[in-house]
């Protein structure tokens, strides 16, 4: 089993998509923090990770902060929204 997944994350606020590699054991809360940090660095904008949510576009559901990537059933190719 691979210990990472490759996902596409869309940020509607910027109308932009980003590709991320996520470790399966990482909690969604930590994933959001790292995504926000990477986007802030790339786009030179301010984002507060405490106000962001991760939404599974394909399953149309909000992803719980306390789940791991594996526990949230995120797999290669999933499309996620960072809102």
Image (cartoon, rainbow, N blue to C red):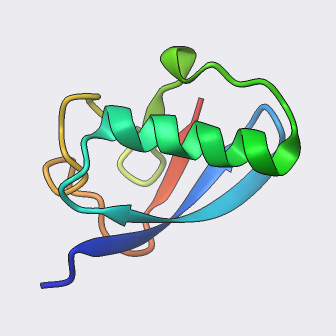
The one nearer the camera, 23 or 11, is 23
Q: Is residue 22 left or right of residue 32?
A: left
Residue at horizontal 78 percent and vertical 24 percent from the top: 46
Residue at horizontal 21 percent and vertical 83 percent from the top: 2
The answer, for residue 50, to whether it is visible in the render is yes
Residue 24 vertical placement versus 42 (above, below): below
Residue 9: percent from the left, percent from the top?
Answer: 58, 54
Residue at horizontal 83 percent and vertical 39 percent from the top: 14
Residue 62: percent from the left, percent from the top?
Answer: 36, 31
Residue at horizontal 50 percent and vertical 50 percent from the top: 80
Q: Is residue 73 left or right of residue 37?
A: left
Q: Is residue 73 left or right of residue 81?
A: left
Residue 31: percent from the left, percent from the top?
Answer: 40, 44
Q: Quadrant of the C terminus?
A: top right
The answer, for residue 61, to whether it is visible in the render is no
Residue 45: percent from the left, percent from the top?
Answer: 84, 31
């Amino acid at each position: 089993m691979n210990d990472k997944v490759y996902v596409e994350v869309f940020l509607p606020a910027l109308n932009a998509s980003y590709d991320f590699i996520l470790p399966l054991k990482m909690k969604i809360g930590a994933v959001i923090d790292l995504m926000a940090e990477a986007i802030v660095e790339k786009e030179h904008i301010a984002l507060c990770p405490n106000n962001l949510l991760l939404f599974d576009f394909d399953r149309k559901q909000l992803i719980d902060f306390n789940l791991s990537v594996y526990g949230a059933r995120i797999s290669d190719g999933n499309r996620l929204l960072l809102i």
